[in-house]
Amino acid sequence: MDLECSPLALPFPEMPEIDGVRLRVARAGYKDWDRADLTFAELAPGTTLAGVFTKSACASSEVELGRQQVKAGTARALIVNAGNSNAFTGYRGREAVDAIQRQVAEALDCMPGDVVVSSTGVIGVPLPKDKAHAGIEAAQRAEDCDWEKVANAISTTDTFPKGAHASAMLGETRGELVGIIKGSGMIAPDMATMLGYVFTDADVAPGFLQEALERANAETFSCITVDGDTSTSDTVLAFATGKAGNARIENWNGPGADAFAAALADVCRRLAQLVVRDGEGASKFITVRVAGAADKESARRVGLAIANSPLVKTAIAGEDANWGRVVMAVGKAGEPADRDRLSIAFGGIWTARDGGPVEDYDEAPVAEHLKGRDIDLAVDLGIGEGRATIWTCDLTHGYISINADYRS
Amino acid sequence: MDLECSPLALPFPEMPEIDGVRLRVARAGYKDWDRADLTFAELAPGTTLAGVFTKSACASSEVELGRQQVKAGTARALIVNAGNSNAFTGYRGREAVDAIQRQVAEALDCMPGDVVVSSTGVIGVPLPKDKAHAGIEAAQRAEDCDWEKVANAISTTDTFPKGAHASAMLGETRGELVGIIKGSGMIAPDMATMLGYVFTDADVAPGFLQEALERANAETFSCITVDGDTSTSDTVLAFATGKAGNARIENWNGPGADAFAAALADVCRRLAQLVVRDGEGASKFITVRVAGAADKESARRVGLAIANSPLVKTAIAGEDANWGRVVMAVGKAGEPADRDRLSIAFGGIWTARDGGPVEDYDEAPVAEHLKGRDIDLAVDLGIGEGRATIWTCDLTHGYISINADYRS
């Protein structure tokens, strides 16, 4: 099935090369598509590693391995296989990953444990070792390529390549951060895993890199939802080559620590939003802003309850300012709320306030706002100081067509 | 919008009159529909009451009142308003309920607190007192009617009337139980509340009636889902008139206690399944059976994660035995699971076993099963003894059409 480009797509940004990162792609032929599907990112010795992973209880071998590698905190290469997730394949899946690690380690003269592997695509079929082997050899012969080519090579059913860039002053030194990501909900017959990678030339200790990534993740990737479903392979990794030559950032007191963390969060936020913009069947990008909750985490849960509600998502698809459905979603979130203090606004215009409809509510500007592509939905629970912002998309016939009409 | 009758509808069953219950309906005209929308069920003195309610943190005034009345444990009348939920209407909504209670109490010479009121329909608009008043007067002048008429009068966007009947031997005495219910997901612009009522002529102490209803609820209404959304007004009430003349059932050791509880659970199960059968856009009735979970509640949560997953629901709509999506849903449930012990079957045929696809899996009989209207999906987590059964429906273009294409 050829998918049309999402109407919410953004153009791929200009992104600089990152010193210490060498990018090559090749065609391993995991599926019968005619494009590169294997990425080989070679990383300078001394590159540090951090990662966050799916909370799924049925995580893939790659995720289990990645969790161990993040503890070690170093990496010399990243291999991404697109077209086969190698998930739910038992020991044979693990063998395929071992073989990739050994082959790449031999080529780079490094430890197999420093070769990070991600796979995305169809599940239940062990990754074919011969195709992976030939693909890696082809990548070694290939010319270096740019970020957009890599963003395409890691994709499965994405309708556009996704990247984001930021820079940060680390003391006197400028550090660059670039990120790429793939994922667009979960598409049959694949499990459309979200795989994201951020590369920086900054010199960052693995402990701090992990802390900064976890903090960024909490406010970005943990705050998006397309359909509430979670892949068994979701992974976001950060690699820091140290080539910028800044004084190594060891903790939050180090020079540039805050600037680096802010730039990392910025890249993560933009990558996360791009995933939503490629949500299956999405026609509107929705920002759900929750205020007045008991605390931050409670605000996030209320926001996700709203953003995951099929009734809220279909109402917005239908350009209907149906605040009753928002009341319902707040009520079912299982978080502290008070019906008589709840207020709801679309596009900055309050439609319900303190537990009841606004008396002289003028629907015209709200209706106009809902006709747009970017929808703003604000909820004030009126009981505390907790705030959160969640990003999601609407639920349309397109989602059903992609997920039900298409047979594997 | 005229909705076509659900393809999963069942005919309304033969249901006996219940001694001590007098049924009348009238047209209050809460909406501009041309049918009865107010139900007046008069209950014999001494009728006992039990109830379970939505867990929504934004519950309606009627729900708050109902919780108090259940503590008192007696009722003389039930009034159901269809077309206006009176939810999110502040003190004015509460005033409308007060007025109904006083009017009915005067007519029946009872306490206002013994008049139970439910409302369902559009939210944010206080129930019009004048219409309620005239509707109750019209009901008092109306002829007695049967259960099917009442099942229709309590409906909003339901596409067929729903009832269930069972009987139980209470010692030497036969007791009858009949139930009616409305609800079909939550339809714009209404909040399609689930309202269910069970009436019995058995003599049951309120404490035991409440315990039996809560036990039945845990395995029936708590085990269905259409879209994971929860109304602010969901209510199930049980009324026992005591006219059968059995020895009052006070506790689980009383004669007929087990038989009564089993019959009540049977009626509740059938009512719950009927709500699923009227799920918005439903084309298939899905039974999700979970076994091998850590415990019963864990099994129920895993079952609901599967049943609420848009990807599982769309796969079944597309008649695709996509067990990868079931793995995903199990993984995201947040319950104990082990990828390498997980088994999945459609229509009794195992497609994946102990963490991997079944080797010589024959898709033909599975594909045949998925073409049917009643789909059986079994999951064995392989780690414990916990079991649960969940009922749901598929997710189709019909759901999107009803919820997005229709404007309020």
Image: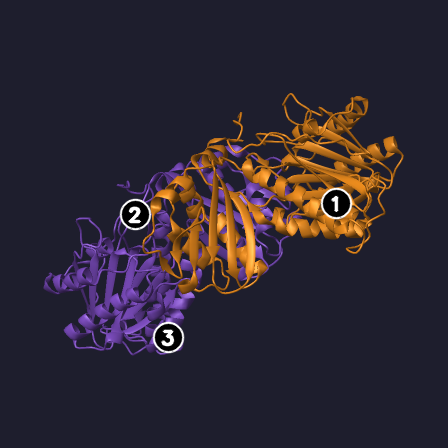
Chain colours: A purple, B orange
Label 1 or label 2, whichever lies nearer to me, is: 1
* Label 1 to label 3: alpha-carbon separation: 54 Å
Marks 1 and 3 share the same chain: no
Q: In terms of secondary structure, where does tag 3 sit?
A: helix
Q: Disc 2 versus disc 3: distance between alpha carbons?
A: 31 Å
Q: Which residue is depicted at the point 22% across and 69% down?
A: A99
Please name the residue that numbered disc 3 is placed on.
A208
* Residue B312 in sight from this viewpoint: yes
User: Mark 1, mark 3: which one is toward the viewer?
Assistant: 1
Q: Are marks 1 and 3 in contact (CB under 8 Å)?
A: no
Q: Tell me residue A117's x, y (percent).
A: 27, 66
A49 relative to B308, above or below: below
Q: Which mark is residue B216?
A: none
Q: Residue furthest front?
A: B172
User: Can you tell which quarter of the image residue B22 is in?
Assistant: top right
Q: Which residue is mark 1?
A: B66
Q: Label 2 lies in what chain?
A: A
Q: Quadrant of residue A39?
A: bottom left
Query: Disc 3 marks which amino acid?
Result: Phe
Q: At 59% across and 55% down in the image, what residue appears?
A: A334
Relative depth, front residue between B368 and B19: B368
Identify the secondary structure beneath mark 2. loop
Residue B185 x %, y %: 56, 39
Q: Which residue position holds label 2?
A: A10
Q: Chain of mark 3?
A: A
Task: Please give the name of the residue rendered at 83% of the width and 38% of the height, measured from the top-left corner.
Answer: B76
- Could you classify mark 3 by the number of other residues whose Cα lies within 10 Å: few (under 14), some (14-19), or many (20 or more)? some
Q: Is residue A242 visible?
A: no
Q: Quadrant of the C terminus of chain A?
A: top left
* Disc 2 crowd, CA 10 A, few/some/many (<14, 14-19, 20+): some
Quarter of the figure that contains the N terminus of chain A? top left
Amino acid tagged 2: Leu
